[in-house]
Amino acid sequence: MRLRNIRGSREVIAGSDYVIHEEETRAGSWHQIFGNTHPIHIEIGMGKGKFIMALAKANPQINYVGIEKYSSVLIRALEKMSQEKVPLTNLYFIRMDAEQIVKVFAKGEVDKIYLNFSDPWPKDRHAKRRLTSREYLARYQKILSDKGDVEFKTDNRLLFDFSVESVREAGWELRALTYDLHQDAVLNQGNIMTEYEERFSALGNPIHKLIASYEKK
């Protein structure tokens, strides 16, 4: 999907109090940024922020970081944040490429990673760019805490099958899996839908979900 450039978006993002800039942070500094020692959960490719904002509202005892690569998308999340009557003090955004994640988060600093409807990168030569590839799992392994895990949702069956295989090949534990989330009484409990999830579900597409973790030796 081609993203339309929004004039002035980079300037708005640069001046926002809700954005922590990559050059302003360092691995291991997030508890200082939030001013507490609460667990840290991140969403990579957060889109317009609906999912992570809902989580932040429901769980004030958890710190959230929404990661988005594109300014034209991140600015929509900032618009939503500015409309909140009560500021969300447990949520920050950062505009960055997920490839750099190990430079921004320290070993064991993150307790959960959410991946929602990630770009499928359908061509085989681009497989390493998929956020559930073994290459990305290796990055997550470095920043996740001992009990940390990755939750992934998509309606793309080919990407989901690829992800299941990647998890197994990387030596991770596949803790939960469903090919029809909304019909799964256990995994669907407390489920928060993203914008894409609402759209694809309305079209009748089943939503797939997995939860995976890596047991550190």
Image (cartoon, helix red, strand yellow):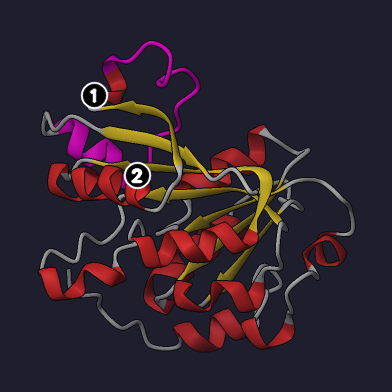
Q: Which mark is residue 180?
A: 1
Q: 97 or 201, which lies in front?
A: 97
The answer to whether the residue labelled 2 contacts the one labelled 1, judged by CB atoms less than 8 Å apart, is no
Residue 47 lies, in percent from the top left, at 40, 59
Q: Is residue 24 left or right of residue 112?
A: right
**In the rendered structure, which amino acid carries the disc numbered 2?**
Arg
Residue 170 lies, in percent from the top left, at 40, 53
Q: 196 or 120, which lies in front?
A: 120
In the rendered image, which quarter contains the N terminus?
bottom left
Q: Is residue 184 magenta?
A: yes
Residue 142 lies, in percent from the top left, at 60, 63
Q: Is residue 45 visible?
A: no
Extent of the magenta region: 183-202
Q: Residue at x 35, y 82 (%)?
A: 6
**In the rendered structure, which amino acid carries the disc numbered 1?**
Asp
Disc 2 marks which residue?
A: 168
Above or below, 12 against 76 in this view is below
Above or below, 133 against 182 in this view is below
Q: Residue at x 63, y 61 (%)?
A: 143
Residue that lies at the very extreme toward the top in this rendered image: 185
Residue 95 lies, in percent from the top left, at 52, 76
Q: Is residue 172 left or right of residue 111?
A: left
Q: Which mark is residue 83?
A: none
